[in-house]
Amino acid sequence: MIIAMVNAKGGVGKTTCTCNLAHALALKGKRVLVIDNDPQANATSLLLGDQTPGHTLFNLLESSMVGSEPDLFTEGQAPAEGPSVPIESCIYPTLLGLDVIPNSTDSATLEFDLYQNAANYGLLRRITRTYAQANYDFCLIDCPPTLGVWVVMAMVAGDAVIVPVEAGSRMALDGLASVYTAVEKASKKANTELTFLRALINKVDLRTSASKLIVETMRKRFPGKTFETTIPVNTSIQQAEIYRTTVLKHDPQCNGSKRFRALADELITLTDMEHKLKGEVNHGS
Ligand SMILES: Nc1ncnc2c1ncn2[C@@H]1O[C@H](COP(=O)(O)OP(=O)(O)OP(=O)(O)O)[C@@H](O)[C@H]1O
Ligand SMILES: [Mg+2]
């Protein structure tokens, strides 16, 4: 399953949840790929540490994208069929038992061309989907804080969207509603396979009434669309980021690590159920 981690709000924990959930899934024996689809390249530095990757998502996108020149289509030139840079050269194994396609800040320079030509919205899908489906159980796509072109590409490439939201902020609810709408549009217009999987409530501090209120309100407003597992505010998570690793590696016994393992279990159960349901529907039809 290919999952885009999306929220237009910054700093809610998209990268933290992507990397730690990915590590937790890998510890459960799943084959996992993380795609760093954010020009900030935060997931890359967390998962690869000091290692400087040669090829990155930047090279993959740049070598396959359709330019912004208006006559490209009138000249009858179709979008590139496949990546000139092979995807295998951008897959980096990590010490955590999962693979990553890293990014670099150079990617920000591609944004204009990506916007200019709608053929590019399917670029990430064309480059990664078949490979990810053939080689991994889970592929998590870390996204930047926007609903712009990077997220459009991730939604076109993926099967599902997880929305990490920050407990304790009223704006979390508005942010969630706008992703919900974006997923509905993407699934109607560009990718019929896409579903809104779950919101993931992060940075929960049940000692504060604000956190409690947000958790309760989210469960009421989006019934059945929020993971049962929530992620607490946890200093080990912050420390792990400073050491450029996951909390599961930094402090496997802390509460944050336990909750990410529980989240992986919940996700595996959920996806097993969905596969079974799809199988039954296909069998019955
Ligand atoms: N549960 C948590 N407990 C404590 N700190 C956390 C938790 N989740 C995230 N953080 C910290 O919050 C900060 C922002 O997290 P992160 O970078 O994952 O957010 P983001 O949504 O990916 O940000 P951006 O929108 O810039 O990509 C980081 O310093 C991270 O260590
Ligand atoms: Mg991030």
Image (tube, rainbow, N blue to C red):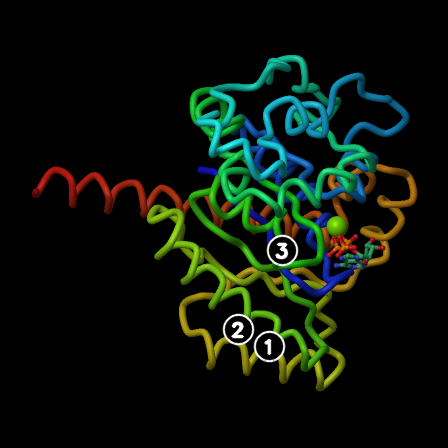
Foreground pick, 192 / 51? 192
Are the residues flagged by discs 2 and 1 in contact, CB closer than 8 Å?
yes
**Residue at the image point whose x is 68% and y is 72% from the top:** 167
Q: Element at badge 3?
A: loop
Foreground pick, 252 / 273? 273
Left or right of 125, for residue 141: right
Foreground pick, 73 / 171? 73
Q: Earlier in the sequence, mark 3 or mark 1?
A: 3
The residue beneath circle 2 is 177
Q: Quadrant of the C terminus?
A: top left
Q: Quadrant of residue 268?
A: top left
Q: Locate residue 213, reporting x and y percent.
A: 63, 84
What whole-number distance in Å separates the C-alpha atoms at marks 3 and 1?
19 Å
Foreground pick, 85 / 75? 75
Say which of marks 3 and 1 sits in front: 3
The residue beneath circle 1 is 173
